[in-house]
Structures are given as structure tokens and as C-alpha cells.
Amino acid sequence: MAEFDTTTEVVVAAEKVRDAGFTETDAFSPFPIHEMDEALGIKRTVLPYLVFIGGVAGLLIGLGLQYYTHVVEYPIIVGGRPHFSLPAFVPPAYEMTILLASFTAVFGMLFLNGLPKPYHPVFNVPRFNLASREKFFLLIKKDDPKFDYDETKAFMEDLNPQEVFDVDE
């Protein structure tokens, strides 16, 4: 793991890491760096598609439940309206759409991010607590297919970081 002082330094280093062929990487900063996803070669998430599917499922479940209740199971005529009255079915169906879409967003985000994860090996590095205040860190994981300890450490030192750390598991 390498420590950097500015966003520009860490983004340039991340681009060099990506260009060198490393794929199992991560970056830590005190605030979001919008260029970092592209610099590390991170692909777009599938979460918006999952949320859309959850919303459509909520809409269909909401309409289906009301249809089953009012048309199939208890067909009672109220005020001369038909059994399937779409204007009356819209508010509950809308609420089910929002409910399932929001649950899909929350639980999908947790699942896709691998959360909850209360422990990460980078917490063992003494200076890592500065990642939440003023420093930027770039990590190459040992799971990377291109990882070789000596070569990777020399490569990280060539990126001109403030310091390079070994992350113990």
C-alpha cells in the first residue's frame, strides 16, 4: 500500500497501476475522487438495473395483490364501481414500487459492496487512520494474478509515494 499527499498524485498512480496490468486494487481517500473509478478500471455497477427490477416487481406485486383481493377472492361491488378500478389501485401499487425498489437498493448495495465488513487488513497499518482526514492510499492486493512481492513493492516505490507499507493480514 502506498501513501500519497494529493488527489492528483493518487489518480496518476492509479492510472499507472491499471496500465501495468494490476486488477485487484483499491484506493482510500477522505472524500470521493470521481476520476478514481476510471483510473483503477472499475466497471459500472449493476445496482441501477437491480433497483429497476425491484421497482417493477413491486408494481406487479402491488397490482396483483389488489387484483386478487378485489376481483378473485372478495368481489364486492362498492359504490357501483367495477371490481378492477385502476385509479383506486394506483396509490398502493406506487407505494409497493417504492418499497421494493428502496429495499433492493439498500440490500443490493450492501451485498455488492461485501458489507458488513468490520475488519480490513489495512487497519493494521498505523498511518492508515489518516485516510479519513488528509492522506490518500493506493492498495494492490496480493490476490492479484500479477502480484509478486518484490516486483510489486519496487513498482509502488517508483510511483513516488510518500511511503510504501506492507499490509499484514
Image: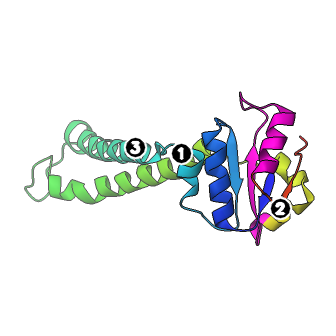
Name the residue beneath numbered marker 2: 162
53 on left or right of 141: left
150 on left or right of 100: right
Q: Position of residue 76 (x, y in %)?
A: 18, 47
**In front: mark 3 or mark 2?**
2
Look at 83% across and 61% down and name the residue there: 162
Q: Earlier in the sequence, mark 3 or mark 2?
A: 3
User: Residue 28 lies in what quarter of the image?
Assistant: bottom right
66 on left or right of 3: left
Look at 19% across and 42% down and name the residue there: 75
Question: Are there few (<14), some (14-19), or many (20+) residues within 10 Å of tag 1?
Answer: some
Look at 14% across and 46% down and name the residue there: 83
Q: Which residues are magenta?
A: 131-158
Q: Which mark is residue 48?
A: none
Name the residue beneath numbered marker 1: 108
Identify the amino acid type marked 2: Gln
Identify the amino acid type marked 1: Gly
**In front: mark 1 or mark 3?**
3
Residue lying at the far top in this picture: please name it. Answer: 145
Query: In this orientation, does residue 67 appear?
Result: yes
User: Residues under labels 1 and 3: Cα distance?
Assistant: 10 Å
Name the residue beneath numbered marker 3: 49
Identify the amino acid type marked 3: Tyr
Query: In this orientation, does residue 114 appear?
Result: no
Which secondary structure lies at badge 2?
loop
Q: Is residue 34 above or below residue 22?
A: below
